[in-house]
Image (tube, rainbow, N blue to C red):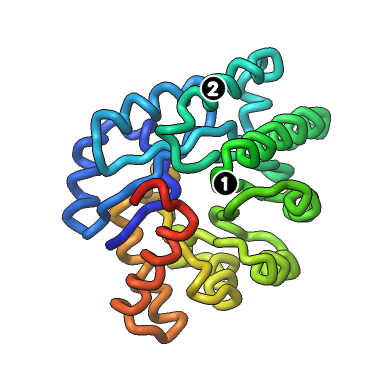
Amino acid sequence: MLIDVHCHINLYLNLQEVLEEAKKNGIEKIIAVAMSELSLKRIIEISKDYNMIYPALGLHPEEVKMNKSIEKNLDKVISYIKSKKDLICAIGEIGLDHHFVKNKELYPLQKKIFKRMLSLAQELQLPVNLHTKGAEEEIFEMLPSFDIPYINIHWYSGPDEYLRVGSERGYFFSITPAIMYSPAVKKVVEEINIEHLLLESDGPVKFSGQIGVPAMIKEVLIKISQLKNIDRTDLEVQIEKNTKKIFSKIF
């Protein structure tokens, strides 16, 4: 069984087509991660319409530059997520971003929101789907202060030293189709043992100009098996076990 653990399913205009293609390629479950205040309810609505989609709710670090009202509305967002605790499988996509968000004046608000999201994950005892771009050091310093069941770092491309720290702490790392061309993503696969690897599309983000879709994780699996020199079927079984461990609510 193939599971896409990180996809922005609400952003597809041709969702039915995307899901049909996923099924044809053996993808049976998709975790739909929210990014914005506006996307929270839409993610829940879609998950009710399609039984292969499982919602994760959170606020992406770029929300601080996209939504001028987010600080004022933060308590309302958290209350909404709490009200859906029985429907969601994780808190995500959350984190810090010091790469795409250039305005350093927004960093304190990012950190405030991230801390609230981590506290929420701790309270609800849910795993997290993390965005760490350009803020790896700060995030890795913060995480031990929270009692969170499991941590998945999506599309990691940061310093090697935090790969080692993450491995030692037992974090999971989800691999995107960027593995086909990105040395940084290949490095993650080389450094992290197969017991802590997951698959994700991060769709509809583009990869070499091609819109990312869940069906692509089949090729990601094949590429990982080649890099690790592991039988593809054995690897698929192991990654399914990993997914069951961290995102148990979708099974």
Q: Position of residue 134 (x, y in %)?
A: 72, 50
Q: Is residue 17 left or right of residue 234?
A: left
Q: Position of residue 238 (x, y in %)?
A: 39, 72
Q: Position of residue 181 (x, y in %)?
A: 48, 66
Q: Position of residue 157 (x, y in %)?
A: 62, 60
Q: Amino acid at mark 2?
A: Glu
Q: Foreground residue, 90 or 206?
A: 90
**Number of numbered labels in the structure image:** 2
Q: Is residue 4 left or right of residue 192?
A: left
Q: In the rendering, which numbered label is found on residue 128?
A: 1
* Tag 1 secondary structure: strand
Q: Residues within 10 Å of mark 1 (few under 14, many from 20)?
A: many
Q: In the rendering, which numbered label is found on residue 37?
A: 2
On screen, residue 183 above or below 51: below
Query: Looking at the image, do the residues carrying marks 2 and 1 touch, with CB atoms under 8 Å apart?
Result: no
Which residue corresponds to the image point at 45% horizontal and 64% vertical from the top-left?
Answer: 242
Q: Residues within 10 Å of mark 2 (few under 14, many from 20)?
A: many
Quadrant of res 225: bottom left
On screen, residue 36 above or below 169: above
* Tag 2 secondary structure: loop
* Residue 161 visible: yes
The span from disc 2 to disc 1 (Cα, nearest Å) is 17 Å
Which residue corresponds to the image point at 20% horizontal and 49% vertical from the top-left?
Answer: 21
Which residue corresponds to the image point at 33% horizontal and 34% vertical from the top-left?
Answer: 12
Quadrant of res 200: bottom left
Which residue corresponds to the image point at 41% horizontal and 46% vertical from the top-left?
Answer: 249
Q: Is residue 221 left or right of residue 123?
A: left
Tell which tag, 2 or 1, sits nearer the viewer.
1
On screen, residue 242 above or below 74: below
